[in-house]
Amino acid sequence: MNPCRDPNDRQAKNGVKFSDDFCGFAWSDEVIASTINWVIDDSNEIVQTGVVFNENKKWDVYSGRWWENPYFEINDFRRIAVHELGHCLGLDHENSVEAIMQSWAGDIEYPTADDIAGVNFLYPASANISNSDGGGGGGSGGGG
């Protein structure tokens, strides 16, 4: 799935990809990844979302301080993915407090209370949640 394709041209599908450009445009030096949200103008409802990761950057998965040896100039995929998934949910950058949604990458590895409060504001819990089939939770099934 190409997150850059207009969902008006076909059925909307969410997607993620690595690319050496951003939807046909050159990456600026400081951009590690970017999210595209397609919304309905009247309601601001997200109908398609996608993340493009800059494949020109160095990537790994690690904990601890950002860009500290032995990871100097290597981006932590997990932190960047969590940040971009926040955008997929509709969160914007938050620079007034420490948050995974700050506009710069840093030492924060997981969503903070502020990030979670933002998601809860956008998607309030419903008091009328029920399971229509009366069964338990899901799962991937399978077994071998």
Image (cartoon, rainbow, N blue to C red):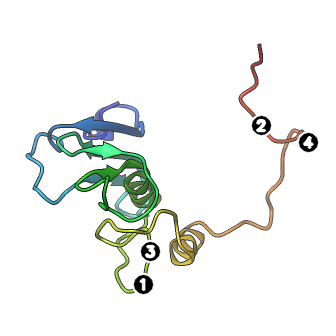
Q: What residue is shown at x 76% (from left), y 25% (from top)?
A: 141
Q: Is residue 137 left or right of residue 75?
A: right
Q: The residue under label 4 is which amino acid type?
A: Gly
Q: Which mark is residue 23?
A: none
Q: On the image, which quarter does residue 20 sit in?
A: top left
Disc 1 crowd, CA 10 A, few/some/many (<14, 14-19, 20+): few
Q: Which residue is mark 4?
A: 134
Mark 1: amino acid: Val
- Using the image, determine if residue 116 lies above or below residue 55: below
Marks 3 and 1: CB-CB under 8 Å? yes
Asked whether, in this view, residue 89 is left or right of residue 140, the answer is left
> Which residue is disc 3 drawn over?
99
Is label 2 in contact with label 1 (beta carbons under 8 Å)? Answer: no
Q: Mark 3 against mark 2, which lies toward the viewer?
A: 3
Q: Residue 72's spot in the image, x, y percent?
A: 25, 56
**Mark 2 Cα-neighbour bin, 10 Å: few <14, some 14–19, many ≥20:** few
Q: Which mark is residue 97?
A: 1
Q: Read off the residue under disc 2.
A: 138
Secondary structure beneath dot 3 equals loop
Placement of 61 over or under 126, stated as above or below: above
Kindly identify the amino acid type of the residue bearing the numbered disc 3. Ala
Which quarter shows the C terminus?
Answer: top right
Residue type for callout 2: Gly
**Identity of the residue drawn at 44% across and 74% down:** 99
Name the residue furthest bottom: 96
Image quadrant containing the N terminus = top left
